[in-house]
Image (cartoon, grey):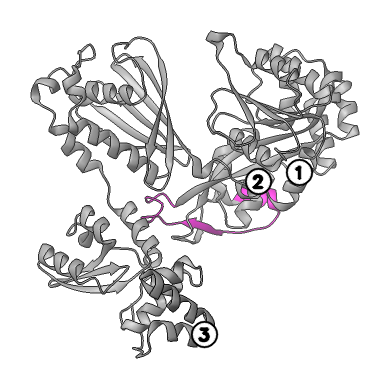
């Protein structure tokens, strides 16, 4: 952090001299400030005349206070310990570094004298302010203040008479469930999971402890262990939130919770089931900010995306998406539906469950208890004048046959099948009882996919990797490399070296040559050879292209695709 040259100009004039805004725009902002009485800086941001980064940089020059990029420089753990999270969020600040008598505090507004005085009194140190954007401060606060200790502290406050009932058959009274510590602990547990980008929360009783795990980027990570005595009130509190029967412990139950995260709502699907040590709960986090990604953002390479869009533009026929559980099939289905014209076409979906709700699209929920299965829902759809039908999954012979008939009678049917690759999907449909000649007539194309972790952009650097990983890349790409972009581990990626996920895809367009081979019941190897001849890229090759681009690592491709390579 270097001290910038101090300027005597006011901020507005500096922005004009720096050609960020014009003199006319400056005059308009001043006029608005006089009318509304708002802050000059806030009006600049509201009018979108300047970005938060530009504002922070020029304010730094104006005040002569260093500007820091927290994403690049990070924060010191010793400094974090000195300032409570509540203080950081109240003033929108975060401690960056600390010496014997000075603490460096990143601030959105270094002119906030009250904040500086309070932190100085709290830490008994001289505060040295530095400037940072509000977004970076909030992001670093989320990353560095973990709630594990606070959750344990809250749960320790449950009265002893309730905690002694920590057996698998304990009856939990309404008084115990309503205890504020339990309520606060569950709230913190969920909010931390959302901050950590977790897709699932597992609360699992063991023989001598209660284990809590988050699934982040597809990998389960243990985040804390708790005394087994807090298991009954925690499970009961979650059940109440999800609208479940707290007295029923033997049968599995399903429910839903909606959490207000301040700037957005997050839906959580709750599933409970009994184990030998008591009830376990898995909470699936359905964050709507990730629900409606456009197709280019889920990992399609440009050439592969062009082929997929060619399939989607077909007025009728069947498009199948295959892969194991957790491979992102639903995400691709939703992204595809978003691509379609929902105003000029009648789009119907049959899902189990309906995870995200769309505007202008008619969605149906599978409910076997009411006689609503994928097959019966598909029959109903046929009488509702559909153009496009999304069937969440083809699981049985009846659904497969009705879906094929729908595709042959002028509808575009989009569905998913559990199969390893594109060619395997064809044989899975045959196994489900659909005649090969009907498959050949109905199929427009197939997509096989996996989700792989992305290299963390904040700590990535060229690194020499294991020889077997080098060989896997060299054999496919026909080029020799020893160094690849790998993440070292940092606060942003929780030390894993990976941040977020992307898809790898195998897109098979059913050409006339492939159709003839399906009708003749040709072998999988022959159909695959023809698909490659027609221009299909394998999952393995698509993954290695992303390795070459520095998006992921050979290890990730091997972990997800090696078994079918």
Residue 56 shows in this picture: no
Question: Looking at the image, do the residues carrying marks 3 and 2 touch, with CB atoms under 8 Å apart?
Answer: no
Note whether 335 is above or below 283 in the view shown. Answer: below
Nearest the viewer among 449 and 186 is 186
Query: Image check: 515 left or right of 186?
Result: right
Q: Calculate the distance from the C-alpha at mark 2 to the C-alpha at mark 1.
A: 9 Å
Q: Nearer the viewer, mark 1 or mark 3?
A: 3
Q: Identify the magenta region.
A: 471-497
Residue 212 position, x and y percent, is 31, 32
Label 2: which secondary element? helix
Label 3: which secondary element? helix
Question: Looking at the image, do the residues carrying marks 2 and 1 touch, with CB atoms under 8 Å apart?
Answer: yes
Query: Image check: 129 left or right of 467?
Result: left
Pick the quarter of the image with the C terminus: top right
Residue receiving disc 1: 309
Disc on the earlier residue, 1 or 3: 3
Residue receiving disc 3: 23
Note whether 372 is above or below 98 in the view shown. Answer: above
């Amino acid at each position: 952090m270097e001290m910038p040259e101090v300027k005597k100009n006011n901020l507005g004039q500096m922005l004009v001299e720096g050609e960020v805004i014009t003199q006319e725009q400056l005059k308009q902002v001043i006029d608005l400030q006089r009318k509304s009485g708002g802050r000059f800086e806030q009006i600049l941001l509201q009018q979108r005349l300047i970005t938060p980064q530009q504002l922070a940089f020029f304010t730094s020059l104006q005040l002569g206070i260093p500007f820091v990029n927290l994403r690049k420089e990070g924060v010191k753990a010793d400094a974090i310990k000195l300032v409570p999270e509540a203080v950081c969020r109240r003033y929108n600040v975060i401690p960056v570094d600390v010496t014997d008598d000075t603490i460096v505090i990143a601030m959105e507004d270094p002119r906030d004298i009250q904040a500086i005085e309070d932190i100085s009194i709290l830490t008994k140190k001289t505060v040295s302010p530095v400037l940072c954007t509000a977004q970076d401060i909030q992001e670093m606060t989320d990353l560095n203040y973990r709630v594990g200790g606070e959750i344990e502290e809250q749960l320790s406050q449950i009265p002893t008479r309730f905690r002694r009932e920590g057996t698998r058959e304990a009856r939990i009274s309404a008084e115990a469930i309503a205890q504020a510590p339990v309520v606060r602990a569950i709230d913190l547990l969920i909010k931390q999971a959302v901050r950590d980008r977790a897709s699932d929360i597992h609360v699992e009783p063991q023989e001598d402890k209660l284990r809590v795990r988050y699934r982040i980027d597809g990998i389960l990570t243990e985040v804390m262990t708790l005394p087994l005595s807090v298991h009954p009130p925690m499970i009961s509190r979650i059940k109440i939130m999800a609208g479940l029967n707290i007295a029923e412990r033997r049968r599995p139950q399903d429910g839903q919770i909606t959490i207000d995260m301040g700037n957005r709502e997050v839906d959580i699907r709750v599933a409970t089931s009994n184990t030998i040590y008591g009830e376990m709960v898995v909470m699936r986090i359905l964050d709507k900010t990730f629900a409606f990604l456009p197709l280019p953002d889920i990992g399609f390479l440009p050439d592969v995306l062009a082929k997929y869009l060619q399939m989607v533009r077909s007025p009728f026929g069947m498009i199948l998406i295959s892969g194991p559980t957790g491979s992102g099939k639903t995400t691709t289905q939703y992204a595809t539906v978003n691509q379609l014209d929902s105003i000029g076409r009648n789009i119907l979906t049959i899902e189990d469950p309906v995870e995200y709700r769309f505007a202008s699209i008619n969605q149906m929920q599978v409910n076997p208890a009411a006689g609503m299965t994928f097959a019966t829902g598909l029959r109903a759809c046929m009488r509702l004048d559909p153009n496009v039908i999304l069937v969440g999954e083809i699981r049985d012979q009846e659904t497969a046959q009705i879906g094929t008939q729908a595709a042959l009678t002028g509808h575009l049917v989009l569905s998913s099948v559990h199969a390893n690759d594109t060619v395997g999907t064809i044989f899975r449909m045959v196994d489900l009882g659909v005649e090969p000649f009907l498959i050949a007539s109905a199929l427009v194309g197939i997509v096989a996919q996996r989700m792989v972790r992305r290299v963390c952009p904040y700590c990535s650097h060229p690194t020499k990797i294991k020889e077997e990983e080098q060989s896997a890349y060299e054999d496919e790409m026909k080029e020799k490399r020893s160094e690849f972009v790998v993440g070292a581990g940092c606060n942003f990626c929780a030390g894993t070296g990976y941040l977020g996920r992307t898809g790898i895809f195998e897109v098979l367009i059913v050409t006339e040559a492939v159709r003839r081979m399906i009708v003749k019941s040709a072998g999988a190897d022959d159909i695959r050879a023809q698909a490659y001849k027609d221009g299909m890229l394998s999952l393995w090759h698509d993954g290695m292209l992303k390795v070459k681009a520095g998006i992921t690592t050979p290890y990730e491709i091997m972990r997800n695709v090696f078994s079918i390579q």
